Amino acid sequence: VRAMVPPTRRWIVPLAVLLCALALRLALADEVALHVRTVLATESGSDFDNRLVGLRRQLRGLFHYSSYRLVKDEERHCPLGLKNNFEIPGGRFLEVMPVALRDDRVRLRVLLIEGTSPPPLDTDFTVPNRGNIWVGGPRNPDGALLISIGAEATQ
Amino acid sequence: VICSNALGVVVSLERETTCEEFAKRVDGFLDGEIDAHAMRAMALHAGSCASCGGDFDRAEALQGLIRSTVLAEVDRIDTSQLWSGIEARLEAPRRGVLAGWRLRGSRERRWLSPVPALALGGALAALLALYAWPTTRPTESIAVADNHAQIERIESTAQHVAVWSEPREHTTAIWVASYEPEAAP
């Protein structure tokens, strides 16, 4: 049989198998679900957005604003090492890159980008798997923006 | 249409453009969208009819004014920030596995062909498949009791940078702003 197959085509089948295995490996690569929520916090009124009920304790414990409203909620699944740009109201971007998964913690690199000026925040940190961290401060005409960055390993 | 008769006398068979036709086709004439014969007829009419010629001159002046105004506005648009804005939204391209294999194909063919390719490919595929076999991992979303973040590095150009956490779940907040965190603890 070997003699009947042209030499140049002899390794096509194993190569195809190899590629399938590689594709399978990539498909099953470590993936992280990034969850970025942007909250507009103000000191006027006492409204609390119902969609933020699960974060009420965190918000009340960390900040002393009187009103909180969810203005953007975005979740993305991405492999480790890939940068993700999340648009933040006011022409800002949050660049989040999941770097590693270790000991049930997710290591993230986060850059807050405002226009072309040097980034106001460039940081590396770890959060527990399914945990989150808050970044606050960017001004909005009505108050301040509070950004929750959550990460969960999905593979 | 201009032609000569049997006696060699040049006769013009072209019908003269009327004011009504001129008015209907003046836009096409201005934009150069009508055929050459019609263009010529329109030009002849504009030159011989003071009323239509005046209308045409005004329309031409208006068109020139619009063009120069639009061009002036376009020149005023600042495009220096355009690319940086687009670039900031771009995601890094996914690695092109197949493209990489195709590029390397010719190089690899040289050393792959002499070896027993079937056995080598099979062994590699088996190894990779074993390596890639899915492992059971928890995917259910549950609240974390201890949510403290470990910050390894912070660089900031903001005037005020603060880090604190709340006492219950130890959730961490990083504050970066050009103003004091007045509503933060």
Image: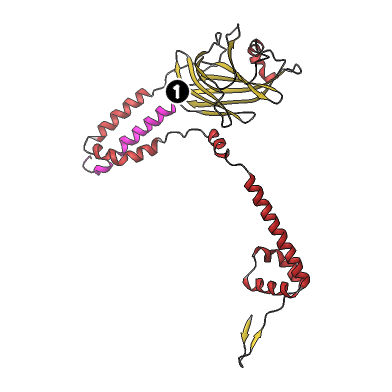
Image position of A103 (left or right of B88): left
Mark 1 surroundings within 10 Å by alpha-carbon count, few (fewer than 14), some (14 through 19), many (20 or more): some
Q: Is A9 one of the magenta-colored residues?
A: yes
Location of residue A89 by image quarter: top right
Q: Is residue B25 above or below residue A78?
A: below
Image position of B116 (left or right of A37): left
Q: Quadrant of the N terminus of chain B?
A: bottom right
Location of residue B50 by image quarter: bottom right
Task: Report the magenta residues as a range.
Answer: A1-30
Q: Quadrant of the C terminus of chain B?
A: top right
Q: Is residue B21 above or below residue A69?
A: below
Of the residues shown, which amino acid type is indicated by label 1? Asp
Residue in front for this viewpoint, A122 or A73: A122
Q: Position of residue A87 (x, y in %)?
A: 59, 29
Q: Position of residue A80 (x, y in %)?
A: 46, 24
Q: Chain of mark 1?
A: A
At 76% from the left and 74% from the top, the residue drawn is B49
Furthest residue in direction front, as rendered: B159
Question: Circle 1 is placed at which residue position?
Answer: A30
Q: Position of residue A133 (x, y in %)?
A: 57, 16
Q: Is residue B102 above or below residue B44?
A: above
Residue in front for this viewpoint, A101 or B71: B71
Image position of A132 (left or right of B98): right
- Asked whether the viewer can see residue B172, the reply is no
